Amino acid sequence: MSLLSVFRWLADSQLSTAIANSHYAFAVIEMVHLMGLTLLGGAVIVTDLTALGLISLKQEIGEIQRDLSPVAAVGLAMLLISGFFMLADGPLRYYGNAAFRLKMLLLVVAALFYFSVHRRALSVAPGARPRGKIRLAALTSLTLWFGVALAGRAIGVL
Amino acid sequence: MAGGVPLLLEWCNRISATSLSTVIRESDWWFNIIETVHVIFTTLMVGTILVVDLRLLGIVLCREPASRVVQAVVPWTWAGLAIMGTSGLLLFISEAAQAYDNVAFRIKLVLLLAAGVNALLFHTTIYRAVGEWDTRLPTPGRARTAGALSVALWTAVIVCGRTIAYFH
Amino acid sequence: MKRMISLVTIALSLTGASLALSSAAHAHHSFSAEFDGTKPVRITGTLSRIEWTNPHSYFYLQVLGRNGQVTTWACEGGGPGALSRRGFKRGDVKLGDTLVVDGYLAKDGSHFLDAQRVKLPDGRIVAGGSPGDGGPQDKPRDNSAASAPSSTD
C-alpha cells in the first residue's frame, strides 16, 4: 500500500467530494487552521521567550511550560484536524507539492521535539540553572515551528 | 468632492497609482514576503494577547500574578503590533483601490478599533486596581469580560482578514 | 482537567465563531469551490488585457466563437513571481498576441478559467496556475489522472 494509493483513496472518498462541493467548508477549515496557529504560536512563543530569558515571570520555566503545554496541544489539534480536511479537499494536488512534503516532515520533527526533548530540557528542578540547554531547546523549537509555518505559506506561493 | 467621487475613494485610487503600490502589487517576491510576514507574525501579536486573555479568564498561569503576566508579555505584543501594522499598511497600499470596496476589509478595521477600545478600557479601569485582584481567583467579572471580549474580537479580526481574499 | 475543559470550550467557540462568520463568504478562493476540476477546457484568443498582479494575475482573451461572435474570457493565473519562475515573464506577451489557454471552468458558468497551461506566441507552453491548485506543477509522478482538454467556443 503506497503513500500515493492512500492519497488516491482519500481523493475518491465521500469526505473529499463533500468538501470540494461545499461553498463554505474550505473557508471554515482555513479559519480554524488560523486560530489553531495563533493558539499554538502564542503558547510556544511565550514559553520559549521565557526560556530564553526575554520574558521574565515569577514561576520556574518548567511550571510555565507545563501550564502552557495544554494550550499548545489544543492549538496543534485544531491545526491537525483542519489540516487533514484541507488535504481531503484535493489530496492529489498536495501529493506532488514539494512545499507540502517539506512541511509535513518539519511538522513531525517539530511536534516530536516539542513534546519530548524540549519538555525534558525545560523541566528542570526549581533553582537549577543549566541555562545553555534550555536556551538551545527554546531556539530549536522556535526555528522548527517557524519552518513549519513558512513551508505552509510556500505551498500556495512557490 | 471631485465629480461625485467620495474623497476616500479618491484617496485610495491615488495610493494605488503610486510607484510603491505598483511595485508591491506587481512584484515577483515582495507581495508574498509581506503577506507571509503578516500571517506568521499574527502569532506574535494575537498569540501573546490570547495568553493574557487566558490569564484573565483564569485558565493559564494562574499562579502568576495577573499584572506580572501583563507586564512581561506586553512589550512583545507591541513588537508584534509594529510588525503587523507595517506589513498590513504595505498590503493595503498595494491594493488600496480594491480595499475600498472590500466589505471584509472594512469590517476588519472596525473590529481592530473595537479590540483597541476594549484593551484601553480594561487598562484604564479595572486594571488600575489590579493590586487588589492580582493573585485572586477568579478574577473580577470585568476582567473576565474584557478577556472574553478580546478573544472574540481577535478571532473575528483573523476571520475577516482571511475573508478579504474572498472578496477580491 | 477543569482547565482542559475550559480550553476545549474556547477552542470549540473559536471554531463556532469561525463557522458563523465565514459561512457568509463565498469560498471562491478554494480551487474546488470556484472551479470545476472535471471540466477542462481550451480557449484560443487574442490578448486584450493583462493584469500582472498579486496574489493572482489575470489575462483577458477575445475568443471568436463558432457563431462568429467574439466573447471575452478571463483567465486567472498565479502571481508574477510564480509565473516568472516557470518561465512566463511579463515581456513574453503583449496585447494582441494569440494565446491558447487550457484550464478549468468556473462553476458558476461564467467565462472565467483557472489557467493551467498557456501556449505563448513563441510556441512555448508554460504552467499558468497557482501552486496548490492541482495544475501541472502539482501533478504526482504517476500521471494516470490526466485527461485531454476539450475545445470550447
Image (cartoon, coloured by chain):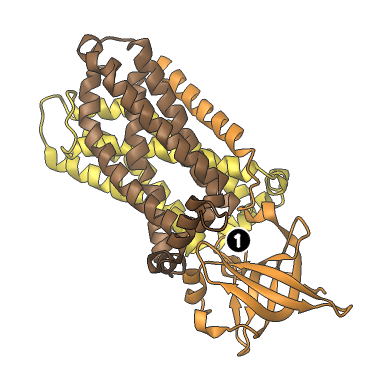
> Where C127 sits versus B94, above or below?
below
Q: Nearer the viewer, residue B72 or B121?
A: B121
Is residue C121 or residue A127 the one in the foreground?
Answer: C121
Closer to us: B16 or A4: B16
Point 22% across, 18% down: residue = B65
Marked residue chain, label 1: C
Left-right relation of B50 to B26: left
Rendering coords of residue C134 (x, y %): 62, 62
Residue A75 position by quadrant: top left
Q: Position of B43 compared to A132: left or right?
A: right
> Disc 1 residue type?
Asp
Q: Give the SS element for disc 1.
A: loop
Q: Is residue B149 above or below residue C76?
A: above
Residue for point 64% across, 70% down: C116
Letter of the orange chain? C
Q: Which chain is depicted brown?
A: B
Residue at the outermost right position: C67
